[in-house]
Image (cartoon, rainbow, N blue to C red):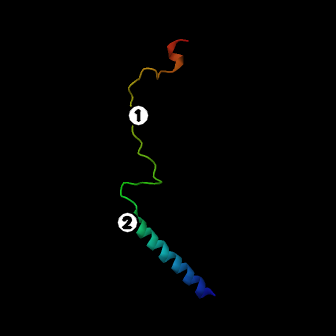
Amino acid sequence: MLGGSILVILLALVLEGLFAGLQKFVVPRGVAVGRPPVDRKASTRRRPGMEPAITKGI
């Protein structure tokens, strides 16, 4: 019974490694699923229409 459990675990690990290797070849190089997008620094220049309403002197 223990031998069968160990064989199943080894088979699962081998298949996991094969699928991970296959995925490396199948997925295009530029695809980054699951990764957060690169945080681009926002422009510090003031744009018209973007000012808060409080500064306009309501």
- Could you tell whether 22 is left or right of 53 in the image? left
Discs 1/2, front? 2
- Residue 38 picture quarter: top left
Dividing the image into 4 quarters, which one contains the N terminus?
Answer: bottom right
Q: Residue furthest top?
A: 57
The kind of residue on which mark 1 rests is Ala
Q: Measuring 43% from the left and 46% from the top, which residue is drawn there?
A: 37
Residue 58, percent from left and from top: 56, 12
Up the image or down, 35 lies above or below 18; here it is above
Residue 10, percent from left and from top: 52, 80
Judged from the image, the secondary structure of the residue bearing numbered disc 2 is helix
Q: Measuring 42% from the left and 20% from the top, which residue is drawn there?
A: 48
Q: Measuring 46% from the left and 49% from the top, which residue is drawn there?
A: 36
Q: CA distance from mark 1 to mark 2?
A: 35 Å
- The residue pinned by badge 2 equals 25
- Residue nearest the observer in this picture, 44 or 23: 23
User: Is mark 1 in CB contact (under 8 Å) with mark 2?
Assistant: no
- The residue pinned by badge 1 equals 42
Q: Earlier in the sequence, mark 1 or mark 2?
A: 2
The kind of residue on which mark 2 rests is Phe
What numbered label is drawn on residue 1?
Answer: none
- Could you tell whether 17 is left or right of 8 in the image? left
